[in-house]
Amino acid sequence: MASGFEDLGFAKVDHHRVIRKGFPEVIFCQGKTNIQIAQIFGKLAKKGNTVIATRATKDNFKAVSKAFKTAVYHEEARMISLANPKSQTLNPKRTVCVITAGTADIPVAEEAAVTAELLGNTTDRIYDVGVAGIHRLFSRLDTIRKASVIIVVAGMEGALPSVVAGLVASPVIAVPTSIGYGSNFKGLSALLTMMNSCAPGIAVVNIDNGFGAGVMAHTILHSPCQGGAGGGS
């Protein structure tokens, strides 16, 4: 523990990360056994911080909930959490707005929204407002423009982040999803569209990486170097 991590043999739990990053290590469940997940979860929970596990199945949750009765399974986001209210300071004046192009993009969007909330941020959700019916987006433009950071989740051709970024002053985090027909190439076409956007103020995370988008939004809002971001207008 003097080194800042706890060696479990199969994992080295990074207890020092909360000091470096402002939030503790997050468990990526995919590829881990239920026993491994439960043990890592327990070690993180002992420190009294909010514990987050991503890409978790119901079986993973059953293994964790045996020891932690107050743990929560966020089914749509595929996440497990054990929240410590003392580590979450909400600021309703600075919000993260999470937008999806389609209903099928919601699981990735929920991963982003739940991550942002568990890290202590206020969120708004605006779902199914893609470019095929752009009037749906315009009907919520007032809410979107008030957000401090905007996360836009889209599959298919991935055009929605460019549209949103051209209408707001706040930073936009684009999340391509693997939703789409064959030439979507499991999200690659959406990723390339977002990377090639001509609208300024867009950052792009990996395909289906809602967690990464949620963390990036939190980092923008709480960076000690920058003093956080203000809302757009």
Image (cartoon, helix red, strand yellow):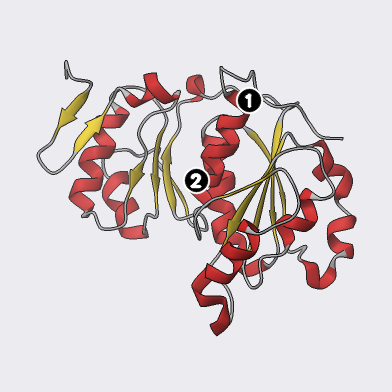
Q: Where is residue 92 in the image (x, y as percent from the top left)?
A: 72, 27
* Amino acid identity at mark 2: Gly
Q: Which mark is residue 90?
A: 1
Quarter occupied by residue 19: top left
Q: In screen coordinates, is 138 left or right of 91?
A: right
In this picture, is 145 found above or below 204? above
* Residues packed near mark 2 inside 10 Å, few (<14), some (14 to 19) or many (20 plus): many
Please tell me which of labels 2 and 1 falls first in the chain: 1
Q: Position of residue 205 (x, y in %)?
A: 53, 51
Q: Is mark 1 on a helix, strand or loop?
A: loop
Q: In screen coordinates, is 123 left or right of 142?
A: left
User: Which image quadrant: the N terminus?
Assistant: top left
Q: Do the residues labelled 2 and 1 touch (CB within 8 Å)?
A: no
Q: Which of 33 and 23 is in front in this view?
A: 23
Q: Residue furthest bottom?
A: 182
Identify the residue at horizontal 66%, vertical 66% (top origin). Answer: 158
Q: Which mark is residue 212?
A: 2
Of discs 2 and 1, which sits in the foreground? 2
* Amino acid identity at mark 1: Leu
Q: What element carries label 2?
A: helix
Q: Position of residue 96 (x, y in %)?
A: 68, 38
Q: Nearer the viewer, residue 118 or 133?
A: 133
Quarter occupied by residue 224: top right
Q: Distance between the residues labelled 2 and 1?
A: 20 Å
